[in-house]
Amino acid sequence: MDSSLNSLRKKAEKDLSKATLDSNVVLVEDSDLDFTIINKVLSPQYNVSRFSTAEALLEQLGDLKVSLFLFDYRLPGMDGIDLCQTIRSVPAFEHTPVIMLTGENYTNFEYKFWDAGCNDFIAKPYSAVTLQKRVEKELKYSALLEQHKEASMIDSLTKVFNRRYLEVVMNQLSARYESPEVSVLLLDIDYFKKYNDRYGHLAGDAALVSVTNTVKRALTRDTDFISRWGGEEFAVVLPHTNYEGCQLVAKRIIDLLHEEHLPHEDSPCGYLTISIGGVTVPESPRDWKTLFLKADENLYEAKKSGRNQYCLKPEV
């Protein structure tokens, strides 16, 4: 048992080390000598970018992809604590690790560092090993959190986003000052209970995966995504998509599924089909659930009209 646990632990450590390799470390340090030392320690494993002042960093912050911030406390102009507080106010970097470097007696500043949102701090002079290990620890912990976050938002069977992720995205779209035109589709596999009864639940699971992959092939833009709504129902979100574009996607999904021609002897068509209800709005409503209620109403209309079709309506 102990040897198995050790093997799992070693594999997890190896995976985390691989995940953090080539991470982007942003250093704010006005001393050329300290930068040279830090760069020598960290650059073999990570991409190190350096800014001499907090103000210089903030000017380019929106263009940066950052895995970890490393700040000197004593900086010309804005100091490290104020910089950390400013970074924490930016949603994109709210949870990005921050390590503070300080030559002060850090016990006198400890509460300030924590209150500012630092993950850790290192007092100068420090050894190369201490710096490397502290940075490595924060990057691995951050990677671990990201893995758990992704796992909690992915449907375990179909490997597409789950309803939790959908709710997060829709809340973000609804909260935008200028919400984009958006279309949504609700998809329901026709006569799926009969499919499970005839072919068994393992075959039903395989069919869900197959349908999911077909829908993904129909989505041609990175901004479009599918999530599992529940059971045999799926939701598709199409940002910046008008009514005509929504129609094209719905038709493409149905056509591609026809091409797959998965046998379903208890369906009038003889193969697996899907019904789709959709709606397009000029901007995301403040209560995004109303959008899906409309789509669900249109899905009902598609099913009532014979299934294996879509029913879409624009909202004005």
Image (cartoon, rainbow, N blue to C red):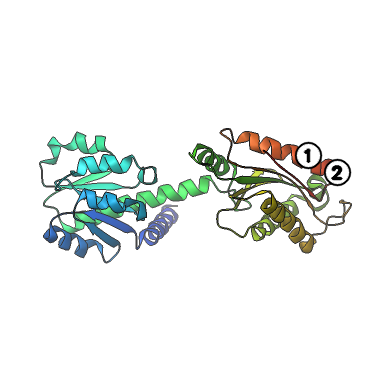
Residue under label 1: 300
Question: In terms of secondary structure, where does tag 1 sit?
Answer: helix
Q: Nearer the viewer, residue 178 or 93?
A: 178
Circle 1: residue type = Tyr
**Where residue 183 appears, x then y in whole percent?**
64, 46
The reply to whether residue 206 is visible in this rendering is no
* Res 233 → quadrant: top right
Q: Callout 2: 10 Å neighbours few (<14), some, many (20+)? A: few
Q: Nearer the viewer, residue 182 or 310?
A: 182
Which quadrant, please, contains the C terminus? top right
Residue under the image location 30 percent in, 54 percent down:
60
**Where residue 137 appears, x then y in whole percent?**
30, 51
**Where residue 15 appears, x then y in whole percent?**
41, 59
Circle 2: residue type = Ser
Q: Nearer the viewer, residue 178 or 197?
A: 178
Residue under label 2: 305
